[in-house]
Amino acid sequence: MERKTKIAFAALATAWIALVFGPGVAGAQNAALIKRGQTLFNSRGCNICHGVGKQNAAPDLKGVGQRRSKEWLTKWLKETDTMLTSDSVAMGMLETYRYQKMPKFKLNAPEIEALLAFIDSRSE
């Protein structure tokens, strides 16, 4: 099965389980996703430069989901280097943060989803 098909199937299965078995299962899955995101945030070193609710060397990520769309954030995490040369917001951040570039992390779609879920959970 193609990778995109597998991811779509997994998302559909998760939605179906949540619908059939109620919010308890969905809540547990969301908690697991957030925990995975927290693990990634720390193990990949995001916490070295970024804070959630505090300013570090890089932008504070608290509320980033309100400032940027999920699509923009996903693209940023997948194609940081490309966006730094093509996206006006990314280029503005580069200037603001004294041309310190965010490293390109080779994140897959589930990892990005987990990271965004963790950051979103800390923004409430």
Image (spheres, helix red, strand yellow):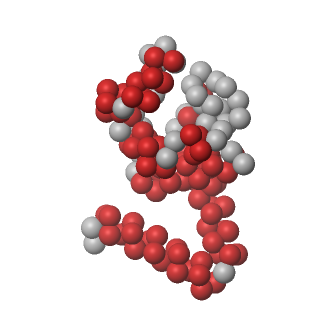
Residue found at the far bottom of this picture: 20
Residue closest to the eye, 15 or 40: 15
Residue 17 in view of the camera: yes
Q: Residue at x 39, y 28 (%)?
A: 88
**View extreme (top): residue:** 98
Looking at the image, can residue 43 be seen? no
Residue 104, horizontal then vertical, whole percent: 39, 33
Camera-nearest residue between 69 and 37: 69
Q: Position of residue 46 (x, y in %)?
A: 56, 34
Quadrant location of the N terminus in the rendered image = bottom left
Q: Is residue 85 above or below residue 25?
A: above
* Residue under the image location 50 percent in, 54 percent down: 113
Residue 65, picture quadrant:
top right
- Viewer-proximal residue among 95 and 50: 95
- Residue plotted at (44% across, 30% down): 89
Examine the rendered structure and indicate whether residue 106 appears above or below residue 17: above
Is 53 placed above or below 119 here? above
Asked which quadrant contains residue 47, the reply is: top right
- From the viewer's perspective, tell me whether residue 79 is left or right of residue 69: left
Residue 81 in the figure: left or right of residue 25: left
Picture coordinates of residue 37, whole percent (x, y): 58, 50
Is residue 23 depicted above or below 123 in this figure?
A: below
| Residue at image point 60% right, 77% down | 18
Q: Position of residue 64 (x, y in %)?
A: 59, 40
Q: How many marks overall? A: 0
